[in-house]
Amino acid sequence: MSDEVLEEAQLPLETVGSRLRRAREHAGVGVAALAAQTRISTRQIEAIEAGDYAALPGRTYAVGFSRTLARAVGLDEAEVAAATRAELTEQQGEDQRRPVQTFEPGDPARVPSARLTWLALAGVALAVLLGIIFLPSLFSPAGTLPSILPADQPSSAAGSAIPPATPTAAEAVVFTALQPGVWVKFYDAAGTQLLQKELAQGESYTVPAGQGEVLLRTARPDLLAITVGGQPVAKLSDMKQTMKDVPVSAAALLARGTAAAAQAPAPPVAGSAAQAARRTSAPTPREQRIPNPRVEASPAPSSLPSAAPPATTVPAPAAT
């Protein structure tokens, strides 16, 4: 039996710190070298070897550091950790005993260094910067979408209003009843009936495309709203009347609206109302008064003085 084994057998009450110190000295490793190897500060190693667990951050750190030091000097780390827990329990006493925490700090030697951490952060920042430069759509999807407007047309951002779309003759025609019980009959040019019924309020009928010329007969054209391609157009009439054989294709309805707009009276010219008021308030020729000018006759050429002839009065012109 070696001297080391005999010494351990003779010292059954040896503390964890003394065992760790003796194993370190037996291995010929200094405190500074052991601190560099385990990344545990020399102050904390000296506190563990002295059994001063109060100088450590907490119970879990004391157990974790003891386990790491035991592995570094060649001792059984599980046995050293159990002995450290037992010593901590004896030092704290029965009234200060707390439940043993299952979490223990990992081996400080396996924790990445500060330099490695900074390198990792720099790599992440570089990857993000390269992504912004070469893949901008990942960070701002709407930033690279091309404009759908022509080059000579200003965008809406410049404040210009885009006019609404004008319906064309190739778009769908829809009739919608504005009141309940609106009787309609749709048929083609050959007289084949397409629909005959009383439409409920809000009920719509779409004129079939590709049917050729479609005609309508109804007694309430004023209660039928019409849209061509989703855009409202003028009604067939604004009053109750019977209408038949009315073409209701998109081209016919659009032409009907164009003709109605052409026949509409022109708007009054600015200032015409004022001119009419002035013409109304101006006096008539009968009401005008024409002054009677007095014409004086020239004296007759005579050597004898004579009295001046009396002035004559020119009568006012008769009113026309």
Image (cartoon, rainbow, N blue to C red):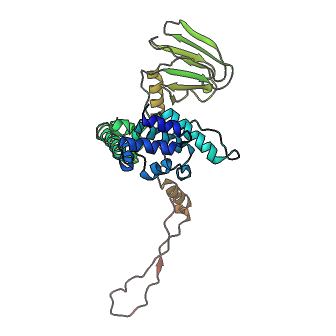
Identified at 52% across, 15% down, the residue is 215
The quadrant of the image that shows the N terminus is top left
Q: Which percent across, then down, holds residue 177?
A: 62, 23
Q: Which percent across, then down, holds residue 65?
A: 48, 42
Identified at 52% across, 62% down, the residue is 285
**Is residue 193 shown above or below 38?**
above
**Is residue 236 shown above or below 157?**
above
Task: Tell me, yes or no, if residue 106 can be seen here.
Answer: no
| Residue farthest right in this picture | 95
Q: Which percent across, then down, holds residue 228?
A: 49, 25
Tally the numbered discs: 0
Q: Which percent across, then down, holds residue 213?
A: 46, 13
Task: Tell me, yes or no, if residue 167 can be seen here.
Answer: yes
Which of the 4 quarters of the picture holds residue 301?
bottom left
Of 139 and 125, which appears nearest the observer?
Answer: 125
Of 8 and 174, which appears nearest the observer?
Answer: 8
Of 75 and 137, which appears nearest the observer?
Answer: 75
Identified at 50% across, 27% down, the residue is 230
Of 164 and 210, which appears nearest the observer?
Answer: 164
**Is residue 197 shown above or below 174?**
above
* Residue 125 appears left or right of 93: left
